[in-house]
Amino acid sequence: MSTVLAVVAHPDDEVIGPGGTLARHAKAGDEVHVLILAEGKTSRAGDPDPEGSAALSAEETAASRAALGATAVHRLDLDDNRLDTYPLLTLAQQVGAVVEQLAPDTVYTHHGGDLNADHELTARACMIACRPHASPVRWLLGFSTLSATDAGYAGRDPFVPALYSDITDTLECKLDAMRAYASELRDFPHPRSLKAITLQAELFGAHADTAAAEAFSVLRGTWDPHDNRQSKEG
């Protein structure tokens, strides 16, 4: 058994990105944690009931956690789409405190080239918190996020997959977890739709010669060729 941690900017990013892989870890008996930095609602203009929106978000996150089979979700509830108002050191320290507490083997986080600034800063904070000699993390993997990675533009680093996780058996868990985030879902062809999520999983699966997959870039890795767990993780 191992401990894994997904560090994401907003509620639902943990599903859209590595949700099927987190469910796969949970089914294998691994301890699965999710750290969400921002609360995900307050940047939207015209919300007549901010307290109600916050309560709804917490309910959706709890239901999604159950669908994935995750051990726990940790929410910092920092200001949505305003992570750039916090010093990067503060973000890295808050991520680092959770990494130190949980001592995960593997950490999943955003692709640093996403158009969404919260995603970019979350990735940077993760790379600092999970740096060698300062953390127990063996693998730091980046994932793409529909409507953020694909919204990038020329000049930003593209997402280049280097590792694929077969989620054929957990795709439905991923979709159930996304259904729990009903307030975040949109109709196809919006990328935050169940159909788009399914199509992306099938496309990544075609890349990896399997029915459905999630793709990751390797931000940092320490591989022991004599450790049999490497063939079972991810």
Image: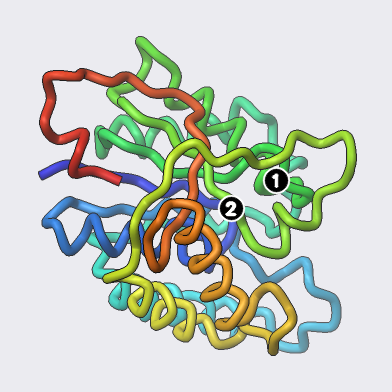
> In the image shown, does 100 or 55 lie closer to the viewer?
100
Amino acid at circle 1: Leu
Task: Look at discs 2 and 1 and give the one toward the viewer.
Answer: 2
Tell me residue 107's x, y (percent): 38, 39
Tell me residue 96's x, y (percent): 42, 30
Residue at left offset 70%, top offset 45%: 83
> In the image shown, does 77 or 22 lie closer to the viewer?
22
User: Would you name the residue on which mark 2 appears?
Assistant: 9
Quadrant location of the N terminus in the rendered image: top left
Residue 212, placed above or below residue 30: below
Provide the secondary structure element on which disc 2 rests. Answer: loop
> In the image shown, does 196 or 66 lie closer to the viewer?
196
Residue at left offset 36%, top offset 30%: 139
Tell me if mark 2 has few (under 14), some (14-19) or many (20+) residues whose alpha carbon lies within 10 angstroms of its own: many
Residue 13, placed above or below residue 233: below
Provide the secondary structure element on which disc 1 rests. Answer: helix
Amino acid at circle 2: Ala
Tell me residue 229's x, y (percent): 14, 35
For the rendered model, the colour scheme is: rainbow
Residue at left offset 39%, top offset 13%: 132
CB atoms of marks 2 and 1 within 8 Å: yes
What separation in Å lies between label 2 and label 1 (alpha carbons)? 9 Å
Q: How many callouts does the rendering have?
A: 2
User: Would you name the residue on which mark 1 appears?
Assistant: 83
| Horizontal relation, residue 68 to residue 38: left or right | left
The residue sitting at the top extreme is: 133
Tell me if mark 1 has few (under 14), some (14-19) or many (20+) residues whose alpha carbon lies within 10 angstroms of its own: many
Q: Quadrant of residue 173?
A: bottom left
